[in-house]
Amino acid sequence: MIVVKTRAELQERLNEAAAKSVIGFVPTMGALHSGHCSLIDFAVENADYIVASIFVNPTQFNDANDLKNYPRTIENDLKYLEQHGCDLVYIPDVEDVYHDKRSFFVDLNGLDTVMEGEFRPGHFDGVVDVVSRLFDIVKPDKAFFGEKDFQQLSIIKYIAESLDVEIIGCPTVRESDGLAMSSRNMLLEENYRKQAFVIYKSLIWAKKNYRKITVNDLKKEIENRITKSGKFIVEYVNIVESDTLVSIDEWKDKNINCCVAVYAGKVRLIDNIKLNY
Ligand code: AMP
């Protein structure tokens, strides 16, 4: 596995090795876990030459402490990537990615105004900026993103419509108790970690029962189930059309997702479930 730190080296390596290959790309912020590894596995199955990036993108953090405390485990990350068949890893510094002042701002047609967009102002501007820049640098044929970050995946699919990159969404990988794997899980205090299964358990309950009660009652019930132990604070529970992310207030014969954001002490966790497909 080749490790490069600059876009110049990256492009040189890509020219040498991958000129005629299908390039599969997995962007990450590091602190890798089995969820990230599953994206590499999907990439290996669906592309010829696998590029991953590890870059903690400052512009998508709206909270300076979150950025400062974001876990960094580079040695382990490299081991995981190599074990799973990654060919090339790009680990740039901020200047290498933001080397010019081009603006990648796009109107996201409301996809960024709800849920994460509402509670983390500017977050998706940063995500769109960095993903556009990374796509511009790596020029992948296919890029792999997790359904765990459901809204992010929708937004990236939307911006990729005008780019020549196929976006492949990959299922959420979970811990044995159901908690969605996340780099932030390692920051959870033990007493929160022990109870955190309640988030997915509540989503599973929602999937089984959603048609029996109103949308509003379902949201309230999910919140009650998550907060019952007194440990967690729910930031939002939202039920949205899967393609437009528009909130619904009554059940529809459309694909819908239920999305939640929860504070477990200082750590913010998100998760979601498809309700009807
Ligand atoms: P991050 O390093 O958190 O920016 O995540 C990099 C990529 O891994 C994103 O596409 C995430 O959606 C994806 N990802 C993170 N956690 C999981 C998970 N538990 N299962 C599947 N994909 C994930």
Image (cartoon, rainbow, N blue to C red):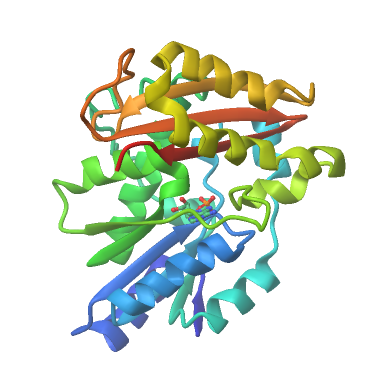
Q: Which one is in front, 76 or 151?
A: 151
- Give left or right: position of 250 versus 127: left
Q: Position of residue 48 (x, y in %)?
A: 29, 82
Which residue is nearer to you in this view: 39 or 127?
39
Q: What residue sits 78% from the left and 25% below the top?
A: 229
Q: Which residue is drawn at 44% across and 36% down?
A: 207
Q: Which quadrant is the C terminus positioned in? A: top left
Numbered circles on residues, count = 0
Q: Residue at x 70, y 48 (%)?
A: 185
Residue 146, horizontal then vertical, whole percent: 43, 53
Q: Could one spot residue 127 in this view of the protein?
A: no
Percent coordinates x, y for residue 177 in the rendering: 68, 52
Using residue 20 as the reference point, say whether residue 6 is left or right of it. right
Image quadrant of residue 174? bottom right
Residue at the (61%, 63%) spot, across then down: 33
Relative height, residue 223 to residue 99 (above, below): above
Q: Relative to 259, is 113 above or below?
A: above
Q: Is residue 257 visible?
A: yes
Q: Seen in the image, is 161 located left or right of residue 234?
A: left
The picture places residue 66, in percent across and down from the top left corner, at 67, 36
In this picture, is 74 found above or below 47?
Answer: above
Residue situated furthest front in the rendering: 212
